[in-house]
Amino acid sequence: MEINFNEDKITEDSYEKPVKKRKWDRWIYLGILLLIVFSLLKWLISSWIFNYADGFLKQQQFDVKFTSDIRILNYTAEEGSPVKKGDTLFSYEFYDTNMRKNSIQDSLKNLVDNTAFDNNIAAINAQISKKTSLAADLKKRIAFWQSEKKRKEKLVYINQITPNELANVDRSIDDLTYELVSVTADIKALSDEIAKMYQINNHKNNLAKEENRTSTIHNYYTSPVNGKTDRFRVADGQVAYKSDIITSIVNKRQFVQAYIDIGDLDEFKEGDRVAIKLPYGFNKTLTGKVKKIYSISEIKDNTLINKTLNENKYGVVIDIVPIDGKSWEEVKISNIPVKVRKLKFT
């Protein structure tokens, strides 16, 4: 309600302030629309102008790994140090849990066998001791009957006894002599058996010692290529299991291994100049050339395959190298995914 103090009347007309219209939200909507249109046009136009391929920026590297489990004893090179072909990198020994279990079992078996061997030797020595005592007794008895024979020969001579009694003494001497020869032969056979047993046991023990010595021998791994050692992934004293990468020997030479779709095979040729877009905020584009196109297609790396679209999982492998033959110095790491772009009209 509005009151007019100059006049003696009251009016009931209401006063409304004018509303200002916003203009900035229109520009936001327009900017979003332009961005969408520009992105769509870029996507459509780029597919007409460029051919694309996915790949990895790599360094020439040699991964050090074994086909069996080993234990690293000591590194003779340092991480990141340059090495030449033939330089010693580390010492190691073969590590096999089954072999160690078998070694323990073999040790216990050898201990049992040695105990049984000692028992057998003791038993045979006891037999030899008994037979030696028997042989000594037989010699005494033979000596007695020989003296008795001399005495009875005199009695026969003077006809005090008959010759039959003397013949009985001769038979006793012959029997005792035969028994002594048999006992002596048994003693010799038992002694020969002990000698053979010692020879066999010594040979077996020597083989076991040699096996233990060779199983714990230190081996040395030498670098097969020139380069620089990367991170040591297995520490001193630790076990590197089968196919584990212990370290890598890298070379400064870099290259891109890319996969082109089979349908784009005719668009790429050896010597073509390409652009390589780096990921992860590098904001850099490298230039290179196609060095080699391989004949056999391969399955793309798992990180490059679209999980929902598997019809393009096969690709033709191409190698891309720097144009001047040098490395891309601005890139300090390798094994990173990149995007390869090539003009269609070159």
Image (cartoon, rainbow, N blue to C red):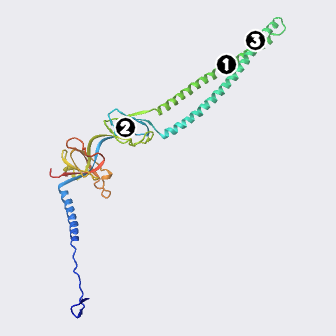
210 and 120: which is toward the camera: 210
127 and 30: which is toward the camera: 30
Q: Which residue is mark 3?
A: 146
Q: Earlier in the sequence, mark 2 or mark 3?
A: 2
1 to 191, vertically: above or below: below
Mark 3: give few (<14), some (14-19) or many (20+) Cα within 10 Å: some
Occupied quadrant, residue 141: top right
Q: Residue at x 68, y 17 (%)?
A: 181
Q: Earlier in the sequence, mark 1 or mark 2?
A: 2
Instruction: Give the CA separation, mark 2 to mark 3.
Output: 91 Å
Mark 2: give few (<14), some (14-19) or many (20+) Cα within 10 Å: some
63 to 131, vertically: above or below: below
- Element marked by disc 2: loop
State yes or no: discs 1 and 2 in contact (Cβ < 8 Å).
no
Q: Which residue is mark 1?
A: 184
The amino acid type of the residue labelled 1 equals Thr
The amino acid type of the residue labelled 3 equals Gln
Instruction: Give the CA separation, mark 1 to mark 2.
Output: 72 Å
Percent across and percent down for residue 308 are 31, 58
Mark 1: give few (<14), some (14-19) or many (20+) Cα within 10 Å: some
Q: Which residue is mark 2?
A: 78
Instruction: Give the CA separation, mark 1 to mark 3.
Output: 20 Å
108 and 255: which is toward the camera: 255
The amino acid type of the residue labelled 2 equals Glu
Q: Residue at x 22, y 70 (%)?
A: 24
